Amino acid sequence: MSLLGASVGPAGDVVTVEMAAGPVRFHALWLRDNARDEASRHGDNDQRLFDVTELADEVTAMSAEVVNGCLVVAFGPDGVTSVYDEVWLEANRYDGSVTASFGRPVSWGAAGLSVQRLPWTDRQDLEAWEAITMALVRDGLAIVDGLAVGDDAAGTGATGTGAGIVDVANLWGPVRETNYGEIFHVRAEANPTNLAFTPRALNVHTDNPYRRPVPGYQLLHCLVASDVGGVTVLVDGFRAAELLRGEEPGAFELLSTRSVPFRWSGDGFDLQNRGPLIEVEEGGPEAGAIRAVRYNNRSAAPFDQPFDEMTAFYEAFRTFAQLLHREDLEYRFTLAPGECLVFDNERVLHGRHGEADPERYLQGCYLDRDWIHGRQLT
């Protein structure tokens, strides 16, 4: 990509930049608001040093030209001149299509998924760490292997086979503690506070939609596997939502524009939140793209749609639920001892097929999204 030239519109309110792929327009006010000069941005943190109310009522571009591969714009009436490099312009353009970049998910079905893995011994290899981080954003999941095994493992080791789930989370950031603690234990309990803490099969779901904010990523470390049952089932919620939009646009419209309540109570907590089952980007160059999926039949509170919409909403809800059970969307595998599955909790639905042995033991924890999606990779 290179900048070939620039011109200012007759009224001075639009700057057109000639790029290799064609012309791209920018409003003069937008360019001035995002001026890159030292008086406008802090050099250490790149934060804006002025408020939009400090700009003139009518901002214009007095001139625009390409100098040494960069766009140089002089503004009126304040006389500020700012320089924009082509990488920045391409990353922030809003006129026309946008080039795909790190941070853009690629949806998958069961047959097309190849799960990225990171051996624990390679955790300090920058290229290997970047590859798994990119996979977590692209695919929504990855596996770290070579960790602790056995019922007595505490999950607090620092190296080799003593490493546990907190060590894996710390590859990106600190564990997000909840009322379940820093680590929760997925195994049969005498008095379970959650159906996950039983040997029962579990329908595919996303965790904790009743929290605000919802945990961004979940980790599940297998310490003791099940001889029968307990097969992990994963579904890409983004792929399912895309299929719903194509096959049943009316159902997609309802599920992406109507908010529903979620609730969990116990152990002195009453957690409540609400949001659409399918959340889409509302603006910007990716408007309409799937942003998040919330589906947890166990934690859905009674729906509260208007009376005249309730029947249609349930039809849409059931249609989506049935779609989530399509075999071609279900990626099934058995998580082995020493493996830790890391997955996007607002995208990848997970479940458990078949009743597991009571001895099956997984440890789980949560990680905020920013620690992964906010990473600046080389």
Image (spheres, rainbow, N blue to C red):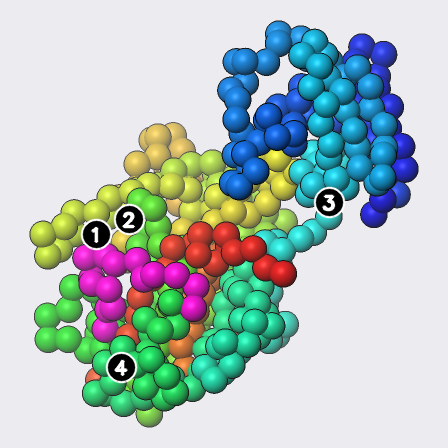
Q: Position of residue 249 (x, y in %)?
A: 58, 43
Q: Which residue is mark 2?
A: 210
Q: Earlier in the sequence, mark 3 or mark 1?
A: 3
Q: Position of residue 126 (x, y in %)?
A: 56, 71
Q: Which amino acid lies under the numbered mark 1 shown in the image of this protein?
A: Trp
Indicate which disc residue 327 carries. none
Question: Which span is picked out in magenta?
Answer: 171-185
Q: Which residue is mark 4?
A: 361
Q: CA distance from mark 4 to mark 2?
A: 25 Å
Q: Nearer the viewer, mark 3 or mark 1?
A: 3
Indicate which disc residue 264 carries. 1
Q: Position of residue 244 (x, y in %)?
A: 56, 51
Q: How many residues crowd mark 4 within 10 Å: few (<14), some (14–19), many (20+)?
A: many
Q: CA distance from mark 2 to mark 1?
A: 7 Å
Which residue lies at the image location 52% right of the left edge and 13% below the top edge?
A: 53
Q: CA distance from mark 2 to mark 3?
A: 40 Å
Does residue 145 lie above or below 6 as drawn?
A: below
Q: Which residue is mark 3?
A: 87
Q: Which amino acid lies under the numbered mark 2 shown in the image of this protein?
A: Tyr
Q: Nearer the viewer, mark 4 or mark 3?
A: 3
Which residue lies at the image location 48% right of the left edge and 77% below the top edge?
A: 123
Cβ–Cβ under 8 Å for marks 2 and 3: no
Q: Earlier in the sequence, mark 2 or mark 3?
A: 3
Does residue 152 lie above or below 28 as drawn?
A: below
Does residue 197 lie above or below 122 as drawn?
A: above
Cβ–Cβ under 8 Å for marks 1 and 4: no
Q: Earlier in the sequence, mark 4 or mark 2?
A: 2
Q: How many residues crowd mark 1 within 10 Å: few (<14), some (14–19), many (20+)?
A: some
Q: Which amino acid lies under the numbered mark 4 shown in the image of this protein?
A: Tyr
Left or right: residue 76 compared with residue 313: right
Cβ–Cβ under 8 Å for marks 2 and 1: yes
